[in-house]
Image: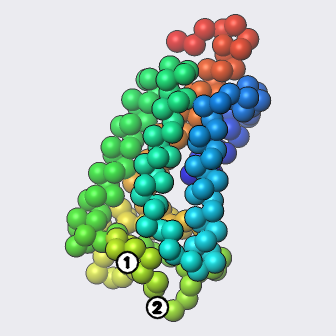
Amino acid sequence: MLETILLALLIGKFKGYKLKPLIKEWPIYPIVVLELINLFLQLTIFKGNYSFIRYASILKTLYLSSFIFLIVKYKRYVGAMAGSLFIFLGSYCNKLAIASNKGKMPVFPTLSYITGYVKQGPFIKADDLHVLGNASTKVKFLTDIIDTGYCIMSIGDVFIRFFVFIIVFSTLKYINKTEIGAVDI
């Protein structure tokens, strides 16, 4: 979800917010550490080593939980509630796709074949959940169809990333407004 954080920071910068005050604060660093671990996981997948993939769901839970530090320290409760609705919606979409496809999440790689994230030939079964999508896939629009070349996401995954964006952007905005003496409502 590194690109989601970078997008929030980029939009914040475009709106004139300073990034340095956020980077100076400790609550951002648990998120950064977990992002680095996720980056390591992605690199191992690129190298063809799928042994760490079984920890991906644990990492995702820890990652989303690490935002609690930003939420509590900067009182981003309204944003967290809105973001939680997106997590709920995204999770529901993912569960619906899995339930509609006999307990599996179909994946439709495109760009990932070019980048080498997914190898040509037989689909490597990295876990018990994901399978290569085909013509019999149901609710295809809810399955993993958004291919970035290093990650294949579903619409549900995108909704979950809205939480990350909301928390990072609202924290950046809050820090900037309070740093210059303005009050954030």
The residue positioned 52% from the left and 12% from the top of the image is 185
The residue positioned 39% from the left and 54% from the top of the image is 156
The residue positioned 25% from the left and 70% from the top of the image is 103
* Residue that lies at the very extreme toward the bottom in this rendered image: 121
Is residue 162 something one can see in this rendering? no
The residue positioned 47% from the left and 28% from the top of the image is 79
Q: Secondary structure at mark 1?
A: strand
Q: Nearer the viewer, residue 19 or 60?
A: 60
- Horizontal side of residue 88 vs 24, given as left or right: left
1 or 2: tag closer to the N-terminus: 2
Is residue 78 something one can see in this rendering? yes
Quarter of the figure with residue 10: top right
Mark 1, other Cα within 10 Å: few <14 / some 14–19 / many ≥20: some
Report x, y in % for residue 113. Answer: 58, 81
Q: Disc 2 designates what residue?
A: 122
Report x, y in % for residue 139. Answer: 30, 67
Under mark 1, the amino acid is Val
- 115 w.r.t. 92: above or below: below
Count how many numbered circles sit on residues in the image.
2
Q: Nearer the viewer, residue 135 or 164?
A: 164
- 168 w.r.t. 105: above or below: above
In space, the residues marked 1 and 2 are separated at their CA atoms by 11 Å
Q: Coloring scheme of the render?
A: rainbow
- 48 w.r.t. 5: above or below: below
Mark 2, other Cα within 10 Å: few <14 / some 14–19 / many ≥20: few
Under mark 2, the amino acid is Pro
- 68 w.r.t. 118: above or below: above
Q: Nearer the viewer, residue 180 or 57?
A: 57
Q: Disc 1 designates what residue?
A: 131
Report x, y in % for residue 60. Answer: 46, 52
Q: Secondary structure at mark 2?
A: loop
